Image (tube, rainbow, N blue to C red):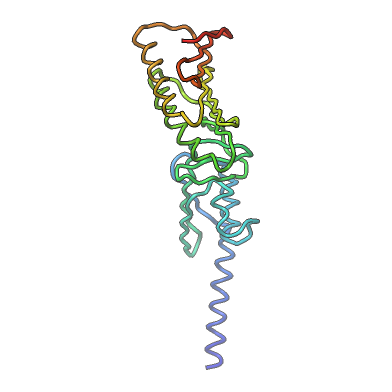
């Protein structure tokens, strides 16, 4: 019995050693187009599987582009299927909001992403993200894309689109002011008037301040 136990322990130790020996032979499959650098992803996943990453075990999912890891160990190599986070907005300090509403801080190596930039306090990001979607729906009427949205304090929200048009709102009356912006855009589209507007301030109750090449007027 004693010799049998020794053999069993030796076999277990051999399996463990074999697993460690094969850990560098990793076949990685990443769903969709990769955002991060492939070599960086492999390094991060290898460290994760060997428990050598500098973060806690679960923090790879908030400190990298990795969203899901599914690993299968064979006699010759480890097959790893990886899904990456899909960002929908960029924040400050290298952070992003994902489609799942998570805030991640991936460690470098990412390609250039064309995302709307959200600027505000940490407890405001989800509210500003909701405002981003609402405003973008209105801008879709004239084919413009939102570039940035920022809470500049005291309930003052400023947004900029890809045509360098600046929009200003009061946070408290944001939805009401969006309706007025929609009416203005529809009027422009239906009338065929194009004044090359670069500034739209909707914070007035009974007027909209417009700027055309640094010249302002109210309607």
> In front: 14, or 104?
104
Extreme front residue here? 206
Q: Could you tell me residue 84's position as x and y percent?
A: 49, 45
Is residue 212 shown left or right of residue 134? right
> In front: 77, or 139?
139
Give the number of callouts: 0
Q: Could you tell me residue 160's position as x and y percent?
A: 53, 23
Q: Which residue is drawn at 59% across and 64% down?
A: 21
Q: Could you tell me residue 128's position as x and y percent?
A: 50, 35
Is residue 135 shown left or right of residue 148? left
Q: Residue at x 46, y 60 (%)?
A: 72
Q: Which residue is drawn at 43% across and 32% down?
A: 133
Extreme left residue here? 190
Q: Is residue 56 above or below residue 14?
A: above
Q: Residue at x 47, y 63 (%)?
A: 74
Extreme bottom residue here? 1
Q: Is residue 150 above or below residue 162?
A: below
Is residue 53 shown left or right of residue 187? right
> In front: 1, or 143?
143
Q: Could you tell me residue 82's position as x and y percent?
A: 48, 50
Q: In this view, does 216 lie above or below 43?
A: above
């Amino acid at each position: 019995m004693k010799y049998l136990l020794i053999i069993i322990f030796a076999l277990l130790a051999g399996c463990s050693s074999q697993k460690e020996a094969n850990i560098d032979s990793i076949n990685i499959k990443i769903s969709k187009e990769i955002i991060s650098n492939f070599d960086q992803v492999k390094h991060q996943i290898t460290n994760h599987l060997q428990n050598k990453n500098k973060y806690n075990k679960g923090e790879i999912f908030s400190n990298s582009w990795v969203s899901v890891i599914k690993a299968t160990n064979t006699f010759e190599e480890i097959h790893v299927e990886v899904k990456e986070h899909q960002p929908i907005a960029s924040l400050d300090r290298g952070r992003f909001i994902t489609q799942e509403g998570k805030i991640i801080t991936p460690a470098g190596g990412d390609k250039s992403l064309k995302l709307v930039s959200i600027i505000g306090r940490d407890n405001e990001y989800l509210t500003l993200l909701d405002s981003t979607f609402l405003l973008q729906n209105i801008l879709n009427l004239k084919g413009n894309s939102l570039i940035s949205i920022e809470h500049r304090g005291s309930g003052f929200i400023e947004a900029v689109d890809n045509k360098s048009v600046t929009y200003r709102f009061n946070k408290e009356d944001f939805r009401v002011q969006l309706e007025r912006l929609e009416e203005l855009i529809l009027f422009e589209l239906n009338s065929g008037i194009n004044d090359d507007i670069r500034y739209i301030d909707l914070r007035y109750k009974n007027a909209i301040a417009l700027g055309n090449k640094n010249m302002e007027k109210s309607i």
